[in-house]
Image (cartoon, grey):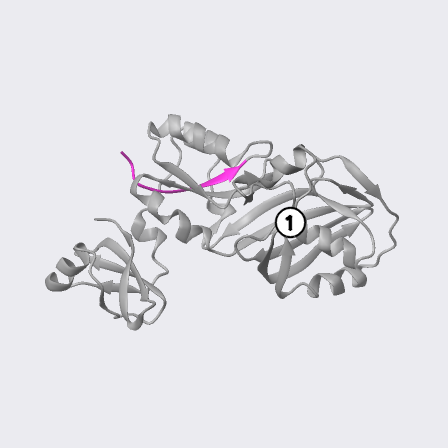
Amino acid sequence: MQNGVLIINKEKDMTSRDVVNILTKIFNTKKIGHTGTLDPIAEGVLVICIGKCTKLCDLLTNKYKEYIATIKLGIATDTLDITGNIIAKKDFSLTTNDIEKVLKSFLGKSIQEVPKYSAVKINGKKLYEYARSNQEIVLPKREIEVKSIELLSFKDDEITFKTMVSKGTYIRSLINDICTQLNTVGTMSSLIRTKQGEFTIENAYTLNDIKNNNYQLLTVEEVLSNLETINLDDDLYKKVKDGAIIDKLFKDDIACLKYQDKVIAIYKTYAKNPNQAKPYIMFI
């Protein structure tokens, strides 16, 4: 069985699960997972973990993500994107300066309401299931961070912008909030994820590339190359192999532990004692 990370450029009108299902057949393994779900309307970077690298899914999901999004002004939909039913219309009169000022106001941390058409679960039931059965429910809110946001174009009834955001940020909801601040309504008409952590769309493969065997899997070592690395001696290797808590030998919150040039574990700061470290992800 192959082990590694694959960067896919997801096509429009496919679910992230569709991509995994196709790759499951190509690689002949069920041990495949993805990080950072993309809606069917969205395109771009979808990080796929295969074999032992499925252990990295949670770690890679935590990374910041960069998007290019387009807003269609003047209409609002129930799904907050162009695939939904129109529920409101409103005229608008905007300048480029108006838009740039509002976009900049979203920089930093804020509280965002999760869209009702999403897979977030409340009481064991997904929000979109409540929405489809017309059941009212209090939508959860979460803290997000907009690290950067930039207007790319404004023409007629469309605004296109680029943004880098934290895990769990819904661009549809961000667009809805932007339009509210612009004193109009709008909906997401397109979305491209251009980056997730260190992975960029320029280095992503299409499904056709994979089918034609035109791809290269990233190794665990390559994926974790940006983490602080600790090389273990024989004694420390034995302790780590047994999953022991060890003295913290690294500066950051997590670090990659290697033995004989091979990644064997990722350790993180032990909450009960910050001078120690405990297992986070094991590869042995």
Percent across and percent down for residue 264 are 23, 53
Can residue 154 be seen from the camera position used here?
yes
Is-magenta flag for residue 260?
no
Percent across and percent down for residue 149 are 64, 60
Percent across and percent down for residue 177 are 72, 55
Task: Please indicate whether residue 192 sits to the left or right of residue 265 in the image.
Answer: right
Residue at the location (88% across, 54% down)?
Answer: 93
Q: Nearer the viewer, residue 245 or 81?
A: 245
Element at label 1: loop
Is-magenta flag for residue 9?
yes
Percent across and percent down for residue 89 are 85, 43
Name the residue tied to disc 1: 139
Chain part drawn in magenta:
1-10
Task: Please indicate whether residue 100 sits to the left or right of residue 191 in the image.
Answer: right
Task: Please indicate whether residue 272 sits to the left or right of residue 64 in the image.
Answer: left
* Most distant residue in the left direction: 234
Q: Nearer the viewer, residue 102 or 201?
A: 102
Q: Nearer the viewer, residue 224 or 89?
A: 89
Residue at the location (33% across, 52% down)?
Answer: 222
Q: Main secondary structure of the magenta part?
A: strand
Can residue 41 be seen from the camera position used here?
no
Instruction: Tell me: residue 278, above or below residue 14.
Output: below
Residue at the location (63% across, 63% down)?
Answer: 110
How many other residues sit within 10 Å of disc 1, few (<14), some (14-19) or many (≥20)? few
Residue at the location (33% across, 72% down)?
Answer: 251
Instruction: Tell me: residue 67, above or below residue 211.
Output: below
